[in-house]
């Protein structure tokens, strides 16, 4: 046999032996072990019982049976939550409280959103320095009955005016961007027999000066109309109002008389 053939056969034999050893190692190697970490069960998570709202509550409504205890992860309990460990009698004690703002089902109860039993709702929600003044309205003078609490409105005064022999009307916006605190609503039937909701009295949030203005305007006006403003205008700063309706411009000893819709001033004695 030629020496070159012997060399080729030797190399082939060595390759075959190497391939066999590799195959045997692959078949005999143990499968890798995969360790799965088991998530802790919910029962093992530390939890407290928290007082939550079980149904939607509108602003000014009593909580009654809308409270319940619910387990809450201890890591997520905030200091202002009401917990059963700290106040076990809270559910019974707070049932007669009134919601200061809108409350939603599933949210933890916060005591600062409540008005205690026997407290005045309106006096509680009224900001410091403001006054609550009631104004008579109707569907025809309140944007068709679509004005609701927390809406912003302009107050428009319409009154008769005599110009020579002619008689007409003067219309003026006396207050702007005023917040509606409350509006009473009753069920009535319209001309076609449909049931509608119509407010008769709107309570407005005013400064002391604005309260004087609207009080005088109610005596002068043939009609006061509320004009609904867009939500985007809520932060608009208003600089002009009908200050001429009140005599609070620093002048003492002056009495303002209103007669037949006309204003006159006389010196007080």
Image (spheres, grey):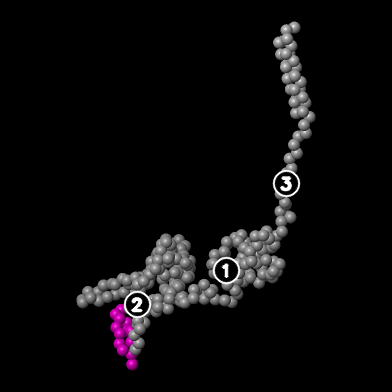
Principal SS element in the magenta part?
A: strand
Picture disc at residue 37: 3
Residue 187, position as x, y percentages in the image = 48, 66
Q: Residue at x 47, y 62 (%)?
A: 195
C-alpha distance separating marks 1 and 2: 36 Å
**Residue ranking furthest to the left:** 165
Query: Residue 215: in sight, yes or no?
Result: no
**Residue 262 falls inside the magenta stretch:** yes
Q: Residue 191 appears in which quarter of the rendering?
A: bottom left
User: Dot 2 corresponds to which residue?
Assistant: 243
Q: Are marks 3 and 1 in contact (CB under 8 Å)?
A: no
Span colored in magenta: 254-269
C-alpha distance separating marks 3 and 2: 74 Å
Q: Nearer the viewer, residue 33 or 2?
A: 2
Picture disc at residue 259: none
Q: Nearer the viewer, residue 131 or 188?
A: 131
Residue 207, position as x, y percentages in the image = 43, 76
């Amino acid at each position: 046999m030629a020496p070159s053939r012997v060399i080729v056969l030797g190399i082939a034999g060595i390759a075959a032996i190497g391939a066999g050893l590799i195959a045997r190692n692959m078949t005999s190697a143990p499968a890798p072990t995969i360790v799965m970490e088991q998530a802790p069960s919910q029962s093992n998570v530390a939890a407290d019982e928290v007082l939550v709202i079980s149904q939607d509550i509108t602003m000014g409504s009593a909580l009654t049976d809308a409270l319940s205890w619910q387990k809450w992860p201890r890591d997520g309990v905030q200091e202002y939550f009401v917990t059963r460990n700290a106040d076990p009698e809270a559910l019974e004690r707070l049932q007669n409280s009134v919601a200061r703002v809108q409350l939603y089902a599933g949210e933890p109860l916060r005591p600062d959103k409540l008005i205690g039993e026997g407290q005045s709702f309106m006096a509680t929600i009224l900001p410091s320095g403001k006054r609550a003044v009631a104004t008579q309205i109707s569907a025809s003078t309140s944007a068709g009955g679509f004005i609701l609490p927390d809406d912003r409105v302009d107050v428009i005064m319409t009154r008769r005016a005599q110009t020579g022999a002619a008689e007409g009307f003067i219309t003026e916006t006396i207050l702007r961007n005023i917040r509606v605190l409350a509006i009473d609503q009753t069920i009535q039937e319209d001309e076609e027999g449909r049931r509608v909701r119509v407010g008769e009295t709107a309570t407005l949030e005013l400064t002391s000066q604005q309260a004087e203005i609207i009080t005088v305007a109610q005596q002068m006006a043939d009609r006061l109309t509320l004009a609904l403003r867009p939500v985007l205008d809520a932060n608009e700063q208003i600089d002009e109002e009908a200050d001429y309706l009140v005599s609070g411009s620093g002048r003492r000893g002056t009495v303002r008389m209103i007669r037949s819709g006309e204003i006159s001033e006389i010196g007080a004695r």
